[in-house]
Amino acid sequence: MELLAAAFSAACAVDHDSSTSESDARDSAAGHLPGSESSSTPGNGATPEEWPALADSPTTLTEALRMIHPIPADSWRNLRLLYQEYRDKSTLQEIETRRQQDAEIEDNTNGSPASEDTPEEEEEEEEEEPASPPERKALPQICLLSNPHSRFNLWQDLPEIRSSGVLEILQPEEIKLQEAMFELVTSEASYYKSLNLLVSHFMENERMRKILHPSEAHILFSNVLDVLAVSERFLLELEHRMEENIVISDVCDIVYRYAADHFSVYITYVSNQTYQERAYKQLLQEKAAFRELITQLELDPKCKGLPFSSFLILPFQRITRLKLLVQNILKRVEERSERECTALDAHKELEMVVKACNEGVRKMSRTEQMICIQKKMEFKIKSVPIISHSRWLLKQGELQQMSGPKTSRTLRTKKLFHEIYLFLFNDLLVICRQIPGDKYQVFDSAPRGLLRVEELEDQGQTLANVFILRLLENADDREATYMLKASSQSEMKRWMTSLAPNRRTKFVSFTSRLLDCPQVQCVHPYVAQQPDELTLELADILNILDKTDDGWIFGERLHDQERGWFPSSMTEEILNPKIRSQNLKECFRVHKMDDPQRSQNKDRRKLGSRNRQ
């Protein structure tokens, strides 16, 4: 197999005019890889007699692969899909794949506790094909799925691949690896097409140049020309790799080099996001000519009905998606191989770029937010400096403070409740009372590390959603206790989680290596509304750390370990323990630390000049 891997010095291409149907693509993506029978079915472009004779000898195999003509980039570069469409389609297929795997394994358990379907539902599933997802997991369709002119092709569906006979000699896992590398390249081509449309159709429009002042154009489009130039060079190198031969040798070495040396342009662009959004909203409100032009340009068929804002956020979407695509490759490469080392290096570099992008966005917005909060505060106690480069807001909101003895008489009076307002920062809690003029009077504070919380037992409706907050050392250098009432169970748990993040939760985090942690996958995108919430993308997998009876989940996303709250209605649970365990094991592999052997291999390896025999 090592000699076979050495022969994979290559590339392949995508012809988006292929006759493969959408259902065939989904079946292949779900692991239904073609064997000798499927490769000889009508429509593959060649009969078995036309395939080159490939002997069992590795030497003969290598020579045979070299005899196969490379596929020119022109045969797959002419994409019909914009990146926004391509990305949505890919993630929807990823969700469907997990659903099918979950449903198939549930069917195989034949009435085990993991299967919650009723007998009537099981009969319906037997009548239908197993690939059909359960009705309880219905996902809203987008028009792209029913568009016959927007086919989403796989590497193995290319006529050149099917007629070569290479599918007969590659193992299923190796074909999946080819598909993973192929998706990275074709999605980059789709991304470049959309990014180029942002520049040529919007930014370089003659009327746009006349309407916008150069400073406004600079804020709105930032350094998009630099991002476009890097994407073009990156795509050209990927294309050259694919044109070398019919089987892809590797792409992560190219990804690593660009992430380390060129992707800083993404950090600059994404860090400008706060000012970009504000400038766009301001231009829409204040310049009628700009508003009319944007509407007119969006209606152009080139934009496929997509809004201008979806083009502006392309670079941020791409850099995060690129990291996930490398993760997908990493899950499929052979362990302790050179390709695994290269994929780990590429993933590590991309992770650093993504973190820098996120930090750039946060730094811009946090500074303004802290200045605004500082202006609204009036201190009844000794003043505490709020603005700091290392401080940011975690949560803010109103709670009801309960005071007085807990007797039946006082519980019946509403004077027991007093409204207070909390500002919780990453290192400090500030307790205030709201006063006229949109101001807050600060009467207590404490370092976040000196906070303790305790949930009260069920003591009736009056004390529902009540918890105790202890300040081990407050502004007066003494211990203080507050009995606080939230508006709902989820609000109470969210405050408790934010105030004391290390407290024990209902479920154990995956970092404890418990291989049967409850999991969900995102089926509806969600944008965080508060600092303690987590923005979700389609197909994200998350471990459940805690959840409430009124529909909120506190979870940890596997691919980046980010934690936060989100509505349970945005997700669906992964029921099968085998699938959950597999997700965790893949996560451990992606995030495993460098071992000494890998470090030695990295020192000896020259990235970008791989030996292609």
Image (cartoon, rainbow, N blue to C red):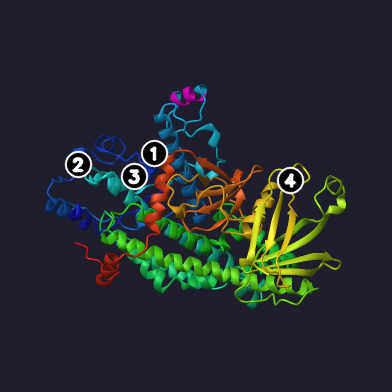
Q: How many numbered discs, if any?
A: 4
- Name the residue carrying label 4: 464
Residue 6 shown left or right of residue 251 in the figure: left
Q: Nearer the viewer, residue 396 or 178?
A: 396
Q: Is residue 529 above or below residue 222?
A: above
Tell which tag, 3 or 4, sits nearer the viewer: 4
Observer able to see residue 531: no
The spot of residue 453 in percent (x, y) is 65, 57
- Name the residue carrying label 1: 27
Residue depicted at 56% across the width and 61% down the height: 311
User: Mark 3 or mark 2, which is nearer the start of the sequence?
Assistant: 2
User: Mark 2 or mark 1, which is nearer the start of the sequence?
Assistant: 1
Q: Nearer the viewer, residue 153 or 602?
A: 602
Residue type at the position of mark 3? Asp
Tell which tag, 1 or 2, sits nearer the viewer: 1
The spot of residue 102 in percent (x, y) is 44, 37
Q: Main secondary structure of the magenta part?
A: helix
- SS at mark 4 in the image: loop
User: Mark 3 or mark 1, which is nearer the start of the sequence?
Assistant: 1
User: Mark 2 or mark 4, which is nearer the start of the sequence?
Assistant: 2
**The C terminus lies in which quarter of the figure?**
bottom left
- SS at mark 3 in the image: helix
Circle 1 residues within 10 Å: few <14, some 14–19, many ≥20: some
Tell which tag, 1 or 4, sits nearer the viewer: 4
Magenta region: which residues? Answer: 121-126
Q: Gap between marks 1 and 3, in whole Å? A: 12 Å
The spot of residue 248 in percent (x, y) is 29, 56
